Image: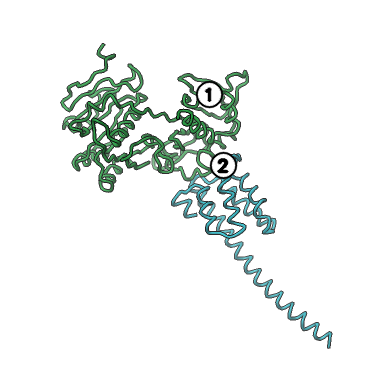
Amino acid sequence: MKELQEKKRQEQILQVLPKTIRKILVDERIQFIDLQEIRIRIGQPLLIIYQNSEYILPSKNEIKHIISKKEIKETLDYVSNYSLYAFENEMKQGFITIEGGHRVGLTGKTIIENNKVKNIQFISSINIRVAHEIIGCSDKIIPYITLNKQICHTLIISPPRCGKTTLLRDLVRQISNGNPYVKGCTVGVVDERSELGGCFMGIAQNHMGIRTDILDCCPKAEGMIMLVRSMSPEVIAVDEIGSPEDIHAIEYVMHCGCKLIASVHGSSIEEIKNKPVLNKLILEKRFERYIVLDQSIGVGRIQKIFNERGNCIFQNELESA
Amino acid sequence: MQEITYTRAPLPELFQQLVTYSEEPYCKWFEYLSSELEEKNESSFYEIWEKSMNDYLNTLHLKENHLQMVLDFGKQISELHFKPETEQMSLILQQLICQIQEEETALKIRLKLCNYLGVMSGLFLVILLF
């Protein structure tokens, strides 16, 4: 099974790379399951992040491979299936999601229209971030965010790169499939940046559960209301809330009887309380559970879980020590 | 063009759709284009386009300038990233349609001329024989 996954991942990544880079990676004999990033920049050496360390390729040669303009163009052609026009909306956000849920980040010259990024041209750097979903990473917290086999309105508070999206994704999978703590529910996911489902051509590439409906690349506020009206979800999940429109949509969703699981950037409840838009939701005790993640005790580690009154109901052993 | 500007369908999908609507040799040409683009083995769209034209459209015996027009069209597709380029492509398509219309008009005139020449030659032969 692991071998099959490795082979599939290898195929998905190699097929978007130019022949020259494909050869270098194959010659390196790396395990694609441990590959985190491939960085391609015009005129710069080929870099990879592998097993949490950076390598300049070919690692065994003294003369390193320098990326040419043609290789960038070739990569773009493969990533977009020779159809960059089809990814204009994704490019506005700076990345394209490819088969397997892997994310291809792009930088170059931005085209601005009405003070907003309309597109990117003259692309000079590409960063391929290999998708790594961690099945079962929410096992520990499920008992704390459920009551009578029902999920509570939950807000995940986390600084960037602490694994909030990974945690939210696994929560969606578990709620959708059902487990001893929660009965399987219809889950609607508004995946504005294709981070949760990693959708490719509308199909989720990550495990999102059997009762999950995903609105891919859809603005959160609009998407939440659309889902309530069209798919009658029991639970709605959204990543990185924060705008006034999001809050209005959250209130609408909660009034409609749907449970909400959301994530937000922050390091504590106090910090969220200081955000004018989110403060209202906390004071009104809209959320029943707050999960706080913290990088100081490791990526994806839960620091504390609070209830609606702000009482701590779970504290990480490392933290309490 | 609508498929490109409105549904944003990628090129391999578009060519695959065209296979069902077109006749020989175009259907085989579109099928080849679609599969080659999916394979991702050639470095650029234009190379695939050029090779496919040589392999599949040679039976049409197109004139040099017409071949160049189709080649240019391929180049335009390969650089199709943004809205101004789609507008430019519409222009090229318009030019191609005008060229086809001109050729069709010329063909009609030539056919008429051939018919007249045939009748005249026949009459001339009859006069010569009698």
Left or right of residue A155: residue A163: right
Res. A73 image quadrant: top right
Q: Which residue is mark 2?
A: B39
Where does the image place residue A276, in percent across and percent down from the top left? 23, 31
What kind of residue is marked 1? Answer: Ile
With respect to residue B96, does A219 lie above or below?
above
Res. A238 image quadrant: top left
Label 1 packing within 10 angstroms: few (<14), some (14-19), many (20+) = few
Figure quadrant of the C terminus of chain A? top left
Q: Which residue sits at x=70%, y=77%? A: B115
Where does the image place residue A69, in percent across and percent down from the top left? 58, 33
With respect to residue A127, does A227 lie above or below?
below
Left or right of residue B40: residue A294: left
Q: Colour of chain A?
A: green
Chain designation of label 1: A
* Pick the front one: A42 or A310: A310
Left or right of residue A207: residue A64: right
Chain letter of the cyan region: B
Res. B64 image quadrant: bottom right
Label 2 packing within 10 angstroms: few (<14), some (14-19), many (20+) = few
Where does the image place residue A162, in percent across and percent down from the top left? 35, 24
* Pick the front one: A57 or A245: A57
Q: Which residue is mark 1?
A: A30
Q: Secondary structure at mark 2?
A: helix
* Pick the front one: A10 or A184: A184
What kind of residue is marked 2? Answer: Glu
Residue sitting farthest toward the bottom: B130
